[in-house]
Amino acid sequence: MLDTPLVGARQEPVMRAVIQERYGTPDLVELGELPEPVPADGEVLIKVRAASLNGSDRENLAGSPFYARLGGLRRPRKPVPGSDVAGVVAAVGAAVTEFAPGDEVFGELAGYRGGLAEYVATPPNLLARKPPGLSFVDAAALPQAGCIALRATKGVKDGDAVLVNGAGGAGGALVVGLAKHFGAEVTAVDRADKADYLRQIGADEAIDFEAEDWAERRGRYDRIIDLIAHRSPYRVQRALRPGGAYLMVGGRTRILLATLIAGPTAGWRAGKRVRVLAVPQSRAHLEEVTALVLDGAAAPVVDRVYPLAEAPAAFARIAAGDNRGKVVVEVP
Ligand SMILES: NC(=O)c1ccc[n+]([C@@H]2O[C@H](COP(=O)([O-])OP(=O)(O)OC[C@H]3O[C@@H](n4cnc5c(N)ncnc54)[C@H](OP(=O)(O)O)[C@@H]3O)[C@@H](O)[C@H]2O)c1
């Protein structure tokens, strides 16, 4: 092996990327250089303009809950974090017919990683065309949170009482916004210092989870959307009205397993449904929720925008829980 590169040897093009080699705290996240990806036959290469952070990025940084390690048990297999992107197609593989260089696109990345870089190569099936009226920053804020909100509020109708637990984080604004759009009376739960924000995004009532346990409100809700579950299925079902539904979206692994196993029997006598909501990454759902956003039904809230060079600070913000809505990283 040569220590000195050959004069005239072809240099691999490199790109700036955020790199997370291990699970842990935000100080492990750093800006570095990686080879620019080359799209495979069935992939598009996106020149990333903006990428947003979700609760799942906070979990993927920490490696907790345990399901966050599906992408690598001891360390992330893909070192670049970032699941939601918006950008411009820079190149397409030979088998890709639906997009061409220059197209503006946005969407989720398979495996929930890779977006915090100047370029990412990904299959086109999860991507949608970015509407011209949507900025790259707003488009990047939409995919994961929007698809969760769309699925979690499906079937909500006028006059329903809906509780959203963990509504003050990345995805809550779209969940609360869509539930209000469908005519629900919304109770939003988070920390006390987010109460004003929860009302700004449309909640009729805000609960400080450290001051009150909403699960003690017996028979009150038609739908409970739990973004940060840590109660057993038997406890949460008590807060449902007969015929109501509890949907676990995110939370502790122990509760995920308990809800999968015991959810179907918890409360069934009163026609209550307690289950885990699996939200598939989907272009069709992204297009559906984008149409609702463009119609003014709901809007993602952008908390703060950081340049790529300051991505570690963006992670520090979500790890500390200081964000109200989406933190977005812009790639100049
Ligand atoms: N089901 C699926 O298919 C699917 C797909 C994608 C993602 N997900 C999951 O969906 C979740 C997405 O939520 P997100 O992005 O909005 O998360 P997030 O940004 O982490 O927001 C969670 C919010 O809950 C607050 N919180 C913390 N402890 C709480 C408690 N005990 N009670 C009530 N609120 C509490 C947090 O406050 P602090 O920040 O101050 O702690 C934060 O404001 C993630 O867990 C993700 O893994 C699920």
Image (cartoon, rainbow, N blue to C red):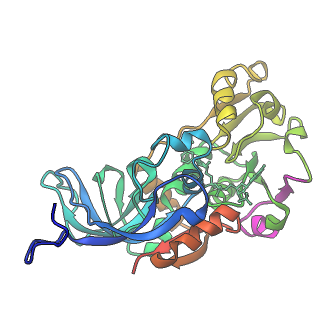
The structure residue drawn at horizontal position 73% and vertical position 42%, both measured from the top left corner, is 224
Q: Is residue 85 above or below residue 164?
A: below
Give residue 302's position: percent from left, percent from top. 59, 72
Instruction: Give the residues drawn in magenta, as a range.
Output: 196-210
Say whether residue 252 is visible.
yes
The structure residue drawn at horizontal position 58% and vertical position 66%, both measured from the top left corner, is 27
Give residue 147's position: percent from left, percent from top. 51, 51
Give residue 227's position: percent from left, percent from top. 67, 48
Placement of the C terminus among the 4 image quadrants: bottom left
The structure residue drawn at horizontal position 63% and vertical position 26%, both measured from the top left corner, is 260
Q: Is residue 68 above or below residue 183?
A: above
Placement of the N terminus among the 4 image quadrants: bottom left
Give residue 253's position: percent from left, percent from top. 64, 36
Q: In which quarter of the image is residue 232?
A: top right
The image shows a total of numbered marks equal to 0
Q: In which quarter of the image is residue 273?
A: top right
Which of 40 and 152 lies nearest the eye of the viewer? 40
Say whether residue 134 is visible.
no
In the image, residue 278 lies in the stretch drawn in magenta: no
Q: Quadrant of residue 217?
A: top right
Left/right of residue 98 with respect to residue 199 in the rendered view: left
What residue occupies the far left of the structure in this picture?
Answer: 8
The structure residue drawn at horizontal position 86% and vertical position 44%, both measured from the top left corner, is 214
In the image, residue 208 lies in the stretch drawn in magenta: yes
Q: In this view, does 130 lie above or below 143?
A: below
Which of 37 and 139 lies nearest the eye of the viewer? 37
